[in-house]
Amino acid sequence: MSDATLRSPLHDQHVALGATLVPFAGWEMPVRYTGDIAEHTAVRTAAGLFDLSHMGEISIRGDQAAAFLDHALVGRISAVALWGAKYTMLCTPEGGVIDDLIVYRRDWDHFFIVANAANKDVVVEELTARLAGFDATLEDISPEVALIAVQGPRAEDIVARMCTRGDDDIRAMRYYSAANVLLQGDIHAFVARTGYTGEDGFELFVDADEAAAVWALALEEGAADGIVPCGLSSRDTLRLEAGMPLYGQELTRDTTPFDAGLGRIVVFGTPAKPRGDFVGREALLRAKVEGPSRVLVGLLGDGRRAARAGYGVLDAEGATVGVVTSGAPSPTLGRPIAMAYVPATLAEPGTVVGIDVRGRREDMTVTALPFYSRAS
């Protein structure tokens, strides 16, 4: 391991559990513990426990914190309710995605941003540049924070039992909301009903020096419900089944939210609810009016060979017309699935396209995203 590689505050716990550790976004993180399919299935049927301490956490405070974020991000952050959360993006003036973020409102003048690990420093730098002229402050609190996620249909019961004052706060939480709770051992946690798996679940932000105690508590309280420690590999197949984009694959500086089918998160305002200028507004409005020339679609295969990121998408004549951004065998569906950018003319569900799998054409069918929904 490089001297520059960071370690999670749960590193010793991962080693003790026999996790396979790999470099990821400058960190040494667990890619799996026992097996990808077993971990994936546990989240779909019971519960999985994830260490996400590599993610970036940024605090924004001040009288103009909401106005600043309205200017810096594509969403109307000032409209987020107290203890609410919003999925949004930080875009370039040209409309490209710098990172996708979740913003939590912890007070009327205090917001908490979660950024992707690989982009955290870039996000801090870009937000700092956009802060000029606003009465607000920015602090990168990532080193102080550990993030532990409990995901799956048994997550609510497990996290409720982890609390000391009964389970009312947890059970009352709506999707994309948050609360301050007290866990067993007098551990204060900021808990959000959010996740990246397509299942119900919670993300617990705690002091880094209390991470080990919270991890052990989750394993203890979740044992009867079949909780399983899960690595990055199962997290990737879970989010792929749920049709959730990954920065660096579905989202890049060369893609706009409209390319990725996420134009709904860009708020331009209406005559009844006007919105001021924000970075990228002009380019994004143009992208909305013109429509994307390429579209992010789901692909469903019948064979055994999976499409992988970077594989070419072929039209009926065999010409390369698109590219796979993510692909894997789906443990839940038992079939290969993928996401890919294709021309708008090939984006209709039911369209058959080819995938260049190491020089051999494999047909896949365009399908609406997500591949899996817990409501189905």
Image (cartoon, rainbow, N blue to C red):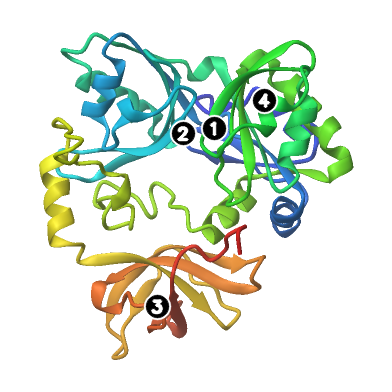
The image shows residue 357, relative to residue 324, as above or below, that is below
Measure the C-alpha gap from mark 1 to mark 3: 39 Å
Give the foreground label among 4 and 2.
Answer: 4
Residue at x 80% of width, y 37% of height = 17
The x and y percentages for residue 120 are 40, 29
Question: Tag on residue 117?
Answer: 2
The x and y percentages for residue 111 are 40, 20
In terms of sequence position, does the residue under pointer 1 or pointer 3 come before the other? 1
Q: Are marks 1 and 3 in contact (CB under 8 Å)?
A: no
The image shows residue 77, relative to residue 260, as above or below, that is above
Measure the C-alpha gap from mark 2 to mark 3: 34 Å
In terms of sequence position, does the residue under pointer 1 or pointer 4 come before the other? 1
In front of the other: 26 or 88: 88
In front of the other: 81 or 227: 81
Q: Are marks 1 and 2 in contact (CB under 8 Å)?
A: yes
Measure the C-alpha gap from mark 3 to mark 4: 41 Å
| Residue that protrudes farthest toward the front in the picture | 272
Question: Tag on residue 27?
Answer: 1
In terms of sequence position, does the residue under pointer 2 or pointer 3 come before the other? 2
| Residue hosting label 3 | 349
Question: Tag on residue 198?
Answer: none
Q: For mark 3, does the 10 Å Cα neighbourhood hold few (<14), some (14 to 19), or many (20 or more) residues?
A: some
Measure the C-alpha gap from mark 1 to mark 4: 33 Å
Q: For mark 4, does the 10 Å Cα neighbourhood hold few (<14), some (14 to 19), or many (20 or more) residues?
A: some
Q: Quadrant of residue 23?
A: top right
